[in-house]
Image (cartoon, helix red, strand yellow):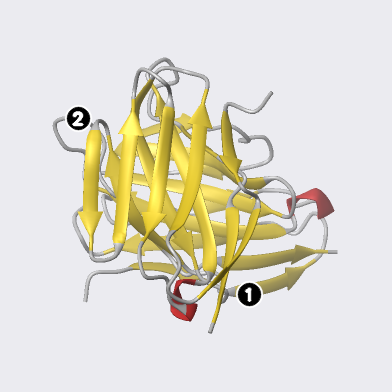
């Protein structure tokens, strides 16, 4: 089954304790992206990757790192989490077609609470 | 001013009604996406448009590039259509970033 898998689905942690949210897709998609969703602010893009070893900042990259060493995986790293990073996070992937615009497939989301 | 504005923010309809959700944007775009977020939180991509009109079942999406406006229509609405509908644009000048509208919360009553 074609899917984008995020882990963990839920995490409560404390300020400053490094954490990684994994994202994996099995559709051979070139494009992968991370978003956060906050009440009143909607969805905002954190980082995206057009292919292996190619990553770019989105709207709100501060406090986050990403890597794309393999096509299927795009982990989101919070080196020193802070309470303002408490949010619902989504990973998504898509093909990069001729127009570089294809429908995105979303993971189920990861709810992070940082105390 | 947000680059992507949706209206209405909230919409309540009776089952069977024709529904229209609007999305206006202020920048030149290469594509516009319509997404559906279910009450459980999952997000599904409904349409990706760069021109014209697309139809899938009871859903129709249109875009007018000159007017910088897109609409999502739902015909014969059903309670299972209750969700948040989100518009997102890929700006021509912002590379491959997506910018999202605030969403329209739709409730369809039986």
Percent position of residue A50, x then y: 31, 36
Residue A62 at x, y = what percent? Answer: 67, 35
Rendering quarter of residue B43: bottom left
The circle on residue B90 is none
Q: Residue at x 83, y 57 (%)?
A: A15
Which numbered disc flags the more N-terminal residue, 2 or 1?
A: 1
Answer left or right for A35 relative to A11.
left
Mark 2 secondary-structure assignment? loop
Reply above or below: A44 against B14. above
Where is residue A30 shown, x and y percent of the image? 24, 44
Looking at the image, residue A6 sits to the left or right of residue A77; the answer is left
| Chain letter of the residue carrying label 1 | A
CA neighbours of label 2 inside 10 A, class few (<14), some (14 to 19), many (20+): few
**Residue wearing tag 2:** A99
Relative to A1, residue A39 above or below: above
The residue shown at (50%, 42%) is: B22
Report the quarter where the N terminus of chain B lies.
top right
Question: Which residue is farthest right?
Answer: A115
Residue found at x 21% / y 39%? A96
Q: Is residue B110 above or below residue A7?
A: below
Q: Is residue B77 visible?
A: yes
Dot 2 and dot 1 within a common chain: yes
Marks 2 and 1 in Cβ contact (< 8 Å)? no
Badge number at residue A10: 1
Tell which of A10 and A94 is nearer to you. A94
Q: Secondary structure at mark 1?
A: strand
């Amino acid at each position: 089954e074609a899917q984008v898998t995020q882990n963990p689905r839920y995490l409560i942690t404390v300020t400053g304790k490094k954490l990684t949210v994994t994202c994996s897709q099995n559709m051979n998609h070139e494009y992968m992206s991370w978003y956060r969703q906050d009440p009143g602010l909607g969805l905002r893009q954190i980082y995206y990757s057009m292919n292996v070893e190619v990553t770019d900042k989105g709207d709100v990259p501060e406090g986050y790192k990403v890597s794309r060493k393999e096509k299927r995986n795009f982990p989101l790293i919070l080196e020193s989490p802070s309470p303002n990073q408490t949010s619902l996070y989504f990973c998504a992937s898509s093909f990069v077609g001729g127009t570089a615009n294809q429908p995105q497939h979303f993971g189920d989301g990861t709810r992070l609470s940082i105390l | 001013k947000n680059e992507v504005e949706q209206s209405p923010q909230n919409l309540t309809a009776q089952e069977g009604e024709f529904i229209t959700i609007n999305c206006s944007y202020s920048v030149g775009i290469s594509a516009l996406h319509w997404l559906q977020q279910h009450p459980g939180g999952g997000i599904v991509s409904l349409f990706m448009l760069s021109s014209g009109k697309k139809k899938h079942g009871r859903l129709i999406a249109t875009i007018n590039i000159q007017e910088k406006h897109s609409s999502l229509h739902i015909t014969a609405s059903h309670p299972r259509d209750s969700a948040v509908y989100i518009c997102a644009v890929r700006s021509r000048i912002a590379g491959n970033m997506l910018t999202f509208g605030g969403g329209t919360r739709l409730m369809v009553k039986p």
